[in-house]
Image: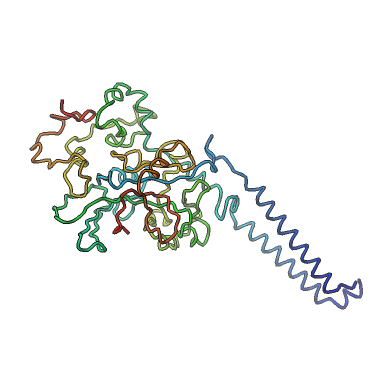
Amino acid sequence: METTRREFLRNTGTLLLLTSSAALAWEAVAAGTPELVPNYRLDQHWWGMAIDIEKCIGCGNCVRACKTENNVPLEPLYFRTWVERYRVLAADLEHPEVDSPNGGFDGFPPHPASPGSKNFFVPKLCNHCAHSPCVQVCPVGATFESPDGVVLVDKTYCLGCRYCVQACPYGCRFIDPRTETVDKCSLCYHRITKGLATACCETCPTGARKLADLKEPKDPIHEFLRTHKVQVLKPQMATGSKMYYNGLDGSVR
Amino acid sequence: MRQFLKDGEHLVRMALLFGLGLLFFVALRAFFVPKGFGELGHFRAAAIADNAARPLMYAGREPCEVCHADVAESRQGSRHAAIACEACHGALAQHADDPARLKPTRPDARKLCVQCHRSEAAKPEKFPQVIPDQHAGTEPCTACHHPHHPEIK
């Protein structure tokens, strides 16, 4: 049984090529697109949100509704969404004064007027990035971008290692003290898959937050994106954020 | 063949060891990797359904308007018409499921109205804002305004 080097290389090469292509093909067959809620198909949605800073009144309805809907601990510092109040002085555009007492849960105590400043509220939440830094660092695959564009957490699989908490450039994640696993905005995944708006969008009295399905041709988001000058947070980080802010000031971080 | 087994005994031993190691690895992997992992990406596919399975707290305005059609109709054309019922009345999915189980409480108008309409520099200029004490003294807002139709006629 003589085998030349040439034969050996050819045979192992073919074997490698065949097994790898077979494995790839099998993965594609096995994947498919499972249905989780009747009439909801993962490949027909791409979720995001339009946030109109010019309409936000800082009432805190979204923060309260989010905590109620998602059973978020009521103590301060645990938020899936929160509202920040900015005061930017014309003389120092780079260093805004930002406050967010209890995340805006109790509303905002009135600010004394400050002539020569601009003032506005910025609602914040998970940006549901298409290329999420938090997903990239998870060592066990407990957080992921779902095929319909929502960054979700697998609570049964999370180790609580806090890597993702540090990786998120928007500070949107926290460790739930009850389970010691990570928690964050799920874009009310249990609601949007049933055709309902998220709790924050549902309760926003001015329509400053609007849930958007970017794959739905009739969604008003397309009109919104066409007629407004929108921006995402930290575009330089190329996270592929899908929270489109209208009237976002350059001082917002 | 016999000659090969004799000369290449060390190779056979290595191959067997390698095979055993591979088997051990496959067995461990099957034990530790959860079902459905990798089906849709580097995560457990069933985690998507887990996220979708949580209970609702806010019902949305359609269920409200089934029973309270009179209120829905009276709110038409009002400046508050676009506001969802639960924005002021709170999370009422349980009430929508079974009206007897959870009764909504009447919101404290003075507190609720002020949450949105108290004057504040960061609010958009066009948004109607008041300094509550100067605007109404200690009177409740509802003395002059109806929350479902806040315009003064």
Horizontal and vertical percent position of residue B77: 27, 26
**Can residue A177 be seen?**
no
The residue shown at (81%, 72%) is: B12
Image position of A236 (left or right of A215): left
Q: Is residue B149 above or below residue A18?
A: above
Q: How many marks?
A: 0
Q: Picture quarter containing residue B56?
A: top left
Kindly give the residue lying farthest to the bottom in the view shown.
B7
- Quadrant where the C terminus of chain B is found in the figure: top left
Horizontal and vertical percent position of residue A100: 25, 54
Horizontal and vertical percent position of residue A108: 21, 49
Image position of A112 (left or right of A205): left
Horizontal and vertical percent position of residue A223: 40, 40
The residue shown at (30%, 58%) is: A250
Q: Picture quarter containing residue A237?
A: bottom left
Camera-side residue of A18 and B122: B122
Image position of A139 (left or right of A185): right
The residue shown at (74%, 61%) is: A17
- Quadrant where the N terminus of chain B is found in the figure: bottom right
Camera-side residue of A67 and B73: B73
**Can residue A24 be seen?**
yes
Camera-side residue of A89 and A175: A89
